[in-house]
Image: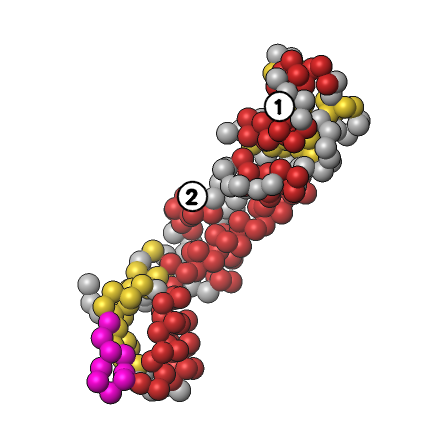
Amino acid sequence: MDMDFGSKERVHLNLAIFKKGGERFEIAVEPELAIKFKHGEKINIREIVHSDKIFTDVQKGSIAPENRLKAVFNKTDAYQIAEIIIKEGEIQLTAEYRKKLREQKHKQIITLIQKYGVDPRTKAPHTLQRIEAAMEEAKVKIDEHKKPEDQVQEILDKLKPILPISFEKKNIKLNIPAESAAKCYSTVKNIGTILKEEWKNDGSWEALVEIPGGLETELYDKLNSITHGQMTAEVMKE
């Protein structure tokens, strides 16, 4: 599926463009919805397009002749044609929107690295500020049309000479007192994966959980807040 995120053409609207046999058809679209629709999400086409007309040039307001729509698409219904244009054509984004996408993905990537990455020497997580500074020093460029998860490994390789970091998970054995067990259960489930658990006769909860290495401190902070420090945690060796 083509998405022309990097077009040098000066674009003032987010467009979906379909070219065939020397002809060009355009529609102005809501970019996020159009991208999701192109990738298979079910979205009402009327929420995506800005008009019930098909254009040969949106910015000039040139409407495509009905006979040409019939010849190329074998139909004249604008919304049905708009679906084809989005799915089979290109999505061309404004420079402003491309910048917005890069900024969003930049934040998502930093959060991912902080969540899963630790300093291999101390096993402690890096701060968001430290990761961001390292990315700036390494002159990391964000690809706005790639998922954050698909860019992380390449970015990590650039960061490692500057910031010692490795992705790892930790297994932690928890023992939570009865009065806090139910509330802690949902907190633990939101942060990690419960591998084993046992509810004791006194109502306390014992669990072995797997969490991203970078979330160890966050887990302890949340559980200590709920239990007022009345819990135990032990990192299990590999």
Name the spot of residue 35 as percent of width and height, x first: 56, 39
Residue 185 magenta-drawn? no
Classify residue 31 by image quadrant. top right
For image coordinates 51% across by 41% down, the residue present is 41
Residue 200 magenta-drawn? yes
Q: Which part of the image, by quadrant, shows the C terminus?
A: bottom left
Q: Is residue 102 visible?
A: yes
Residue receiving disc 2: 150
Q: What distance separates the C-alpha of mark 2 from that of mark 1?
A: 28 Å
Going by the numbered disc 2, the residue's amino acid type is Asp
- Give the mark, 2 or 1, whose residue is nearer the N terminus: 1
For image coordinates 75% across by 18% down, the residue present is 65
Going by the numbered disc 1, the residue's amino acid type is Phe
Bounds of the magenta segment: 197-205
For image coordinates 69% across by 15% down, the residue present is 68
Which mark lies nearer to you, 2 or 1?
1
Q: Where is 183 relative to 6, above or below? A: below
Classify residue 175 by image quadrant. bottom left
Q: How many marks?
A: 2
SS of the residue under disc 1 = strand
Q: Which mark is residue 49?
A: none
Residue receiving disc 1: 18
Left or right relative to 187: residue 88: right
Q: Where is 121 relative to 40, above or below? A: below
